[in-house]
Amino acid sequence: MLSENIKAIRKSKGLSQQELAVKLNVVRQTVSKWEQGLSVPDSEMLISLSETLETPVSTLLGETITEVATEDLKAISEKLEVINLQLARKKVIRRKAIHGLFIVLCVSIVIISAILVVLESPYLRWDFSDPETAVLGTVVHAFEWLFVRLAPLLFIGTVVGIILTRRKD
């Protein structure tokens, strides 16, 4: 069991006998003898072996460890392929949603700009002696002032966003 476990764990870690021997400061033939069952490592070497292979001593001494079957690898690769397809689909959906959001934002900016141009700042003709009208006029004026300064930047940003998120064939 020990010999089979050493060999299986060494292979699963992608180590050659020579590489394992170098890490343990022994010759390759020693590792070969362990794997063939011709000799066994002493207790100190067993601890070093478990640390090097990052495996508990009990696992080394325990039941036989079977190497991962090719069928298992095939099943895992198929599952990974399905996950990759799902992630790719989510990415496409997310990109389409962001693209649509940029288009809606761009259209909204154009519509609000058109409304502001057509209305020609109606709050300027309001009676500001009435407190309610004065507050509403101030709010509308603040919105218009902020919008006129930010809208060009937002518009350019949304056009760039539309271009960057468009579908690439």
Image (spheres, rainbow, N blue to C red):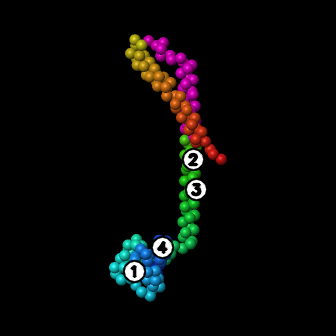
Q: Badge 3 is on which residue? A: 85
**Comparing labels 3 and 4, the label whose residue is closer to the camera:** 4
Q: Is residue 124 magenta?
A: yes
**Circle number at residue 93:** 2
Nearest to the eye among marks 2 and 4: give it: 4
Kindly report the distance in space between the C-alpha atoms of the residues bearing marks 1 and 2: 51 Å
Mark drawn on residue 75: none
Which of disc 3 and disc 1 is earlier in sequence? 1
User: In percent of the image, x 54 and y 73: which residue is there?
Assistant: 69
What type is the residue that disc 4 sits on? Leu
Mark 3 → mark 4, Cα distance in angstroms: 33 Å
Could you say where residue 78 lies in the image, as x and y percent from the top left? 57, 64
Query: Where does label 4 land, which residue?
Result: 15
Question: What kind of residue is marked 2?
Answer: Ile
Secondary structure beneath disc 4? loop
Numbered disc in front, either 1 or 4: 4
What is the residue that sits farthest to the bottom in this orientation?
A: 38
Mark closer to the chain start, 1 or 2: 1
CA separation in Å, label 1 and label 3: 41 Å
| Circle 1 or circle 3, nearest the eye | 1
Residue under label 1? 61
Residue 143 sits above or below residue 2 on the image: above
- The residue lying furthest to the left in this view is 44
Q: Nearer the viewer, residue 65 or 43?
A: 43
Tell me where the magenta segment starts and ends, as one range.
Answer: 99-127
Residue 165, quarter of picture:
top right
SS state under label 3: helix
Q: Are circles 1 and 4 on residues that touch, CB within 8 Å?
A: no
